[in-house]
Structures are given as structure tokens and as C-alpha cells.
Image (tube, grey):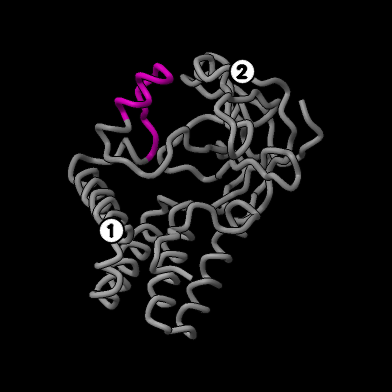
Amino acid sequence: MTDNNLFVVSDVPPKGKGLIATTKIPKGTRIIAEPLLIKVPQVGIAETNGLCAGPDEEDGAVFLATSRINHSCKPNAQNRWNQGLGKITVHAVEDIEQGQEITITYLGNPEVYEERQKKLKNAFGFDCCCRLCSLSPAERDLDDKLIKEIDHLQEDLENEDSILESPIRCLDRIYKVVSQLEAQGVGTSLVPTLFASAMGVAVAHSDLARAKVFAQLSLKGCTISVDQKPQGAHRGPFQA
């Protein structure tokens, strides 16, 4: 399939085919960088294993290796279209052991269990049994509580009054959410964006020293997971 010696395509019951690591893959490693094979209409993405063909594309695309990667709500890799390369890239967001399946998420930001299950069933026709969805009910409740807190935090970060009136509270909430995300190993793509938002809070209050630290943390997270600058950072009136 490719000359990549980091993985092989193998049977992954009951999913069908998937990518299996042939060696230990350290966090931050670029596993794949490949051009698209063919574009597919939005309506055909689920049927063809289509992925994003670019940052402004509504249609999807089929890739030789990346389209073989199965979903996990707690993935060990992340895919992103790299505009500079004109290719899709996949990076390890945690250490992947030899023999372990390489996974990405088919969803966007983290969502609660019931919503994830419904979206995956409707869009892709399967019931997810990944390591996150297989948690005990009590553990799932804790995870859902964190995801709801993330939703509320993002709403507040879009509110200029919250940023200007309660900066310490905003930064404290960002710190707590990031700490929980990193502890649970979920929302990897969200962490750099949250650090970018924290930078915006600091800049709004002329705390440039703290803003520099948050900017470095955001850039570090993006470099590890997607090998490019932060995407989707908040750019409201409170941000420079």
C-alpha cells in the first residue's frame, strides 16, 4: 500500500481493516503524509471512508492509507490537512505501542456519550465500543461532566464581558479543563486552542509575560499533534 514502515494494514475484528503499528511510535511522530486519491461528494463520505480534502472544502476525499484508519472517541493519532504540503498528515498524539491499532476521531470537538453514539450511528452506521465508550457508567458520567464544562467554558470565552470582568476566573477554568483533558487523554486538538484563548485573556489585560507563555504552550501542542500553527483560536475583541 505504502512504503511506510510504521504500520501495516491488518484485520481488526469486528471493524474490518485497520492500521496496526509495527513498531513503537513516540508521541509527536508524523505517521502519514499523503495526497488525496479522489474527491467524493459530502453525501458519500461515510460510504467511501472520505476525509477532509482541505480547510475550506465541503467535499471529502479518499486517501490510500489514512482512509483505512478506524475511529476512536479517544484516539491515539490526529489527522489534519496540511496546506503547506498539500497533503493530509497523521501524527501520534500519545505513544503508540507495537501491535496497537492506530486510531483517529471521526467527530469534531468532544461530545457526551449519547451524542457521540447517535452521530456515529447516523453518519457511519456503527455503535462505538472504543476505550472511552467502554468505560463504566460512573466513569462515563465523569467524562460527560467534563465535556459539559468545556462547552460552558467555550461559551464564556466568546463573551467579551466575561473576559474583561473575570480574567482570573477564566484562566483558572481553562487551567482546570486542560489539566483534566490531559489527565484523561481526550480533546487533544482542543488543548492548544484553549491555551490560545488563555493568551487572549492575558493580552486583553496587558499581561504580556503570561500571554507569551500561553502562546508557547499553544504552539507546542499544535506542533506535537498537527505540525502546524494553532487553528480555530478565539479572535474576539479581547484578543490582539
Quarter assignment of residue 108: top left
How far across and how far down the image is residue 176, in percent? Answer: 30, 67
Report how far apart the C-alphas of labels 2 and 1 lie in the structure. Answer: 35 Å
Residue 2 vertical position relative to residue 175 in the rendered view, above or below: above
In terms of secondary structure, where does tag 2 sit? strand
Q: Earlier in the sequence, mark 2 or mark 1?
A: 2
Quarter assignment of residue 4: top right
Which numbered tag is attached to residue 153? 1
* Residue furthest out toward the right: 3
How far across and how far down the image is residue 58, in percent? Answer: 55, 28
How far across and how far down the image is residue 180, in percent? Answer: 33, 61
Side (left or right) of 73 relative to 228: left
Q: Circle 1: is it few (<14), some (14-19), or many (20+) Cα within 10 Å? A: some
Amino acid beneath label 2: Val
Side (left or right) of 166 relative to 2: left
Amino acid beneath label 1: Leu
Residue 10 vertical position relative to residue 26 in the rendered view, above or below: above
Residue 91 sits inside the magenta stretch: no
Side (left or right) of 122 relative to 94: left
How far across and how far down the image is residue 141, in percent? Answer: 19, 45
Which numbered tag is attached to residue 56? none
Magenta extent: 117-131
Q: Look at mark 2 in the image and give the residue it sits on.
A: 40
Q: Circle 2: is it few (<14), some (14-19), or many (20+) Cα within 10 Å? A: many
Q: Nearer the viewer, residue 131 or 35?
A: 35
Residue at the image position 37 percent from the left and 60 percent from the top? 183
Q: Quadrant of the N terminus?
A: top right
Count how many numbered circles sit on residues in the image.
2
Residue 120 sits inside the magenta stretch: yes
